[in-house]
Amino acid sequence: MASDSYELSATGVDEMNFAEFPLAAISKRIDDGKKTVTFENVIFDRKERRNVVRRLTLSGSDRYGLPIVSDEDVLLGCIQLTRLQGYRSSEVQFSRYELLKLLAWPDNTRNYQRLAQSLRRWKGLTIFSDRAFYDHAAQSWVNRDFSVFDNLQIYHRESQTGSTSSGQSRFTWNEVIFNSFQAGYLKKLDWNLYLSLSSPIAKRLYRFLDKRFYYGNHVEIDLHELAVMKMRLSENYNAAQIKRVLLKGIAELESKWELKSLPGKVQFEKVATSRWIVRFQRKPKRKSIDHPIATGNTILDRFDQSSLAVELTRRGIGPASASELVENAASTNVQTMIEMFDWYNNHGQPRGPGFLVQAIRNPNSIVFPRGFESSEQAAQRRTAQTSRVTRKRILLDASNAEQQQTVDRLQTQFQVFWDGLSPAEQIEFEDKAIELADSTKRLGYYRYQGREGKLFQQYRNIVLRDHYTQLVAVKAIVPSK
C-alpha cells in the first residue's frame, strides 16, 4: 500500500447491515456498565407472508465492554482500508498512523491509545442475529452468531506503510462480514461529508437515510423504532425528548447535505396514542446529462454506466459495489457477466450476487457455460455472418458480371456472323442448330414456335448461339493444313 493510501476520494463505502443496525452506542460512555444489549422489532416477511420478530443482541467483552460512539468511526475507517486494498483478503494490514489520518484524528499518543482500545472493543464484540443480519450472498435473513474481527494484532513499533514484514498491524474480518463485502452488500458513503458532521446523531442519521433514499426521495418510519433501533437512543425517552435530539442532527444535515427542511407538523405526526411517525425528504438531484451520449457501440448505447449500475442492484448487489464495479470494468464485460448470471438462474442453476461480483472483478477466472452466448458474442457472430454474406455477394456479382461480359461479347460476334449469312444459309444454319440443340432447349424452341413472342426469341437465340459457339470451338481445335 502506498504511503498516501489513506487519502480517499470523496466516495467511501458503508456496509448495508451496519447502516441499518448501528453496533455502537450513541454516547461517549456506557454509564450503567451493561455488556449486553438487545434490540427487536416486528417486520412483515414477504416470503413467509406473515409478521416475524427481528432481534439483534450485542455482547461486549468483560474488559473492554460495548462499542461507544467514537468506535463507529473506527469501524467505518476499517471498512475504508479494506476497500483501498481491493477486498483482496479478510486480513487487512495497516499502520495506526495511516488509520488516524484516514479518520482525521490528531497524531498524538492519546489517539494512538484510543484507537487501540477501540479496535479491541470491536474484537471483543459478539453479535447474535435473529433475522437481523442480511446474508446478501444467500439473499436471506439469517440467524447467525459472529464477531467483527477474528484476529487483531497491534504493533507499538510498526514497520513502514507498505512493508510486508511481520511488524505491520493487522485485523482479520469475520467471514460473515467479509463475505458481505465480497457479495457487494455495500453502499456509497461521502467520506468527507461524514467526517465533517459534528453530531453523532447527524452521522448516524446520514448513513441510515442515505441507504433508505436509494430507491426514492421520501422516508417514513415509526419515531420510536428510529430512535431505539436505528439511532440507539434510550428506550426511556418520550416523543418530545426524541424529537429534540433528532432535530439537532436534522438541522446539521439540512445545512451540509441534501436533506430538505420540512415543517414540524409534516416532519413529526402523531397517528395514534403514544405513536408518532417521522418523515424525511431528500432534495432532488440534478442530472448532469439528460440523454445518454451515443458511443457508436450498440451494446454500450443500450447499457450505459448508470443503467448497468441499476441492473446490478436489481440482482442484489449493493449500490456502492455496483457503481465501483461499473467504474472499474469494461461496460461490455459487466453486461456479459449480468447475462451469464441471468442465464444460470434461468436454467435452474441459481447463482448469488457474490458470484456476479467476483465474475466482474475476475473475468479471466470465468469459464462460460456450454450453450451460453452473450449479446456481445451474438452481435459479433451476426457481424461476421453479414461480412461473409457480403463477401459472397461481391464475389458472385463479380462472377456474374464477368459471365455477362462473355455472353455479350459472344452475342456480338454471333450477330456479325449471322448478318453475314444469306437467307438460305441462315435457314440451313438454323435447321442444323435445332437438330444438334440440347433436348430441353429444342423442346422450348418448338413449344413457343409460332407465337413469335419474347420466349420464342430467347430460345431461338440461345439455340443459334450455342451452335455458333460449337462451330467456333471446332474450328479452333482443327489443325491448319
Image (tube, rainbow, N blue to C red):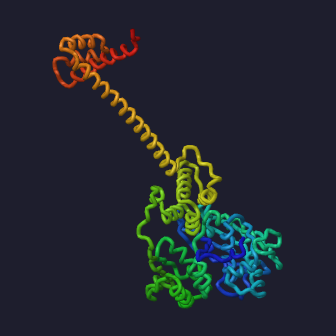
Residue 180 image offset from top left, x and y in percent: 64, 65
Query: Which residue sits at x=41%, y=67%?
Result: 291
Query: Which residue sits at x=39%, y=11%?
Result: 480
Residue 168 position (above or below residue 465)? below
Which residue lies most toward the front here? 481
Residue 105 image offset from top left, x and y in percent: 69, 85
Residue 449 position (above or below residue 151)? above
Q: Nearer the viewer, residue 427 or 246?
A: 427
Answer left or right for 474 relative to 341. left
Answer left or right for 246 relative to 302. right
Residue 223 image offset from top left, x and y in percent: 53, 82
Which residue lies most toward the top here? 481
Query: Which residue sits at x=56%, y=50%?
Result: 344
Q: Nearer the viewer, residue 374 or 29?
A: 374
Q: Nearer the viewer, residue 410 or 448?
A: 410
**Quarter of the image with the C terminus in it:** top left
Answer left or right for 109 relative to 385. right
Residue 301 image offset from top left, x and y in percent: 45, 59
